[in-house]
Image: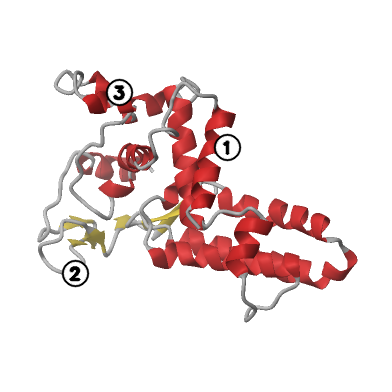
Amino acid sequence: MMKLDAQLMPLQPLTVSCSSKIQIGSTFLVPAHPGSPGKRAVKWVCVCVKSGADTAVAGSHVRLLGLDISLDLSVDRQVSRVCAGCFYRLRQLRRIRRSLDSDSLATLIYAVVNSRMDYCKTVLAGAPRTVTDKLQRVLNAAAHVITGTRKIDRGLGQILHDQLHWLDVPDRVLFKLAVTIHRRLNGRAPPYLSEQCIPVSSADTRRHLRSANRHLLAVPRFRLNTYGRRAFSVAGPTAWNSLPDFIRDPTSSTDCFGRLLKTYLFARY
């Protein structure tokens, strides 16, 4: 193990260009750009380190706090795993549906399905529609189980929004981001989020503008649309700035802010 550490230490501060190779023992570490050569995103096609008889191969994903993160920082694997688990539980609950009333069934589904979908949902900020649609199909299936309707029946949106009071998946992500920003502005968020949420009024060049009184946040510039746009420092202020002025009030309580935000989101359906 000490020999392996000695070989990896010189590689830590090293930056690899697009067309380079690094030989480690008898294996290669080859970074390559996916798609057109003009893209800057790097895809690692092979990561393998050999030290004598020992071989260390990097996996294509890692699980951190119950969240699966791929090499390209996509959440496709995480969403697929959550959807598979939720559909399995919905099939089990469908079998005992006749033995439960609607309220008890809704409570069970919220406990075993919605709670899994809401876990770390802020990582879905900026995710493509193909990813959020998978989770939306889980919500639709859960609504069918609670109400006893079929997939071909109409009025699903009315059931989700008016009867169950469930937000769609993109609005769930927006709600969580906005509440997190509101707590940070009230000093109730973790300290490491303070640097990610900078009010526009704190900038010397914009302090005397009328927009400084609208409680807007500065959105930093980003280079990569696939990575930078999904960072909390960008997605959080962007979600906060998209809210109406009467909701974007950091002096209100969290409960009042949450009620106003939900009312605004449901009114858009």
* Lower sequence index among marks 3 and 1: 3
Give how far apart the Cα atoms at labels 3 and 2 are: 44 Å
Task: Left or right? Give the position of 107 relative to 235.
Answer: right
Residue visible at 48% across and 27% down in the picture: 183
- Residue 55 in percent (x, y) is at 37, 58
Q: Nearer the viewer, residue 88 or 198?
A: 198
Vertical comparison of 107 with 258: above or below: below
- Residue 95 in percent (x, y) is at 81, 72
Q: Do the residues labelled 2 and 1 touch (CB within 8 Å)?
A: no
Residue at the disc numbered 2: 35
Q: Which of 56 and 248 is in front in this view?
A: 248
**Amino acid type of the residue that numbered disc 2 sits on in the rendered structure:** Gly
Residue at the disc numbered 1: 259
Q: Which of 95 and 161 is in front in this view?
A: 161
Residue at the disc numbered 3: 213
Where residue 53 sits, quadrant-wise, is bottom left
Other-residue count near label 1 (Cα within 10 Å), few / some / many at <14 / 14–19 / ≥20: few
Instruction: Tell me the SS state at disc 1.
Output: helix
Which disc number belongs to residue 138? none
Give how far apart the Cα atoms at labels 3 and 1 are: 23 Å
Residue visible at 76% across and 52% down in the picture: 107
Task: Left or right? Give the position of 209 relative to 123.
Answer: left
* Lower sequence index among marks 3 and 2: 2
**Amino acid type of the residue that numbered disc 3 sits on in the rendered structure:** Asn
Q: Nearer the viewer, residue 85 or 189?
A: 189
- Residue 86 in percent (x, y) is at 64, 63
- Residue 251 in percent (x, y) is at 46, 21
Instruction: Tell me the SS state at disc 3.
Output: helix
